[in-house]
Image (cartoon, rainbow, N blue to C red):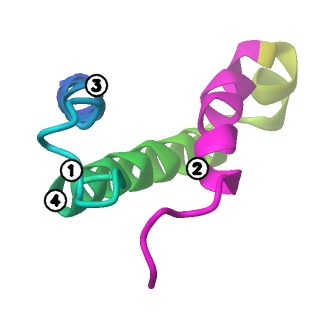
Amino acid sequence: MISITFIIVSTIGMTINTIPEVQGEDGSDNEHLGMIETVCITWFTVEYILRFIGESRDQVVASSLRSLPYFAQAPRKSAPSSRAL
């Protein structure tokens, strides 16, 4: 149930962040929505790692679908951040 909530919050945040009035002055991501997205991605990553650790080696190898959440997050994680750290 928690994961579904994070998915819904992440989707709504990314959708709202496409509205020009909500974006930053230079068209960058809104600070608050960017933070929400970062928290959601962190949750997805932690959940994926815990699931991977919790499964036996045979179950992980047998199910190639286990790698889909990682590949879904990879482009976002490898993209340069629009915010300066």
Q: Residue at x 28, y 25 (%)?
A: 11
Residue on which disc 2 sits: 49
Q: Residue at x 48, y 63 (%)?
A: 82
Three-letter amino acid code of the residue under disc 3 = Thr
Task: Kindly check if marks 1 and 4 are in contact, taking CB atoms under 8 A apart as contact.
Answer: yes
Which quarter of the rendered picture does the C terminus lie within?
bottom left
Q: Amino acid at mark 1?
A: Leu
Q: Mark 4 highlights which residue?
A: 32
Tag on residue 33? 1
What separation in Å lies between label 1 and label 3 (alpha carbons)?
11 Å
Secondary structure beneath label 3: helix
Q: Position of residue 53 (x, y in %)?
A: 63, 48
Q: Residues within 10 Å of mark 2 (few under 14, many from 20)?
A: few
**Identity, as a three-letter code, of the amino acid under mark 2:** Ile
* Residue found 62% across the figure and 52% down from its top: 77
Q: Earlier in the sequence, mark 2 or mark 3?
A: 3
Read off the magenta span. Answer: 65-85
Magenta stretch, main secondary structure, is: helix
Is residue 22 shown left or right of residue 78?
Answer: left
Q: Nearer the viewer, mark 1 or mark 3?
A: 1
Comes first in the chain, label 1 or label 3: 3
Q: Which residue is mark 3?
A: 11
Which mark sits nearer the N-terminus, 2 or 4?
4
Tell me where residue 84 appears, x and y as whole percent. Answer: 45, 80
Please, is residue 80 above or below residue 55 in the view? below
**Looking at the image, residue 2 lies above or below residue 47:** above
Compared to 41, does 17 lie above or below? above
Secondary element at image label 2: helix
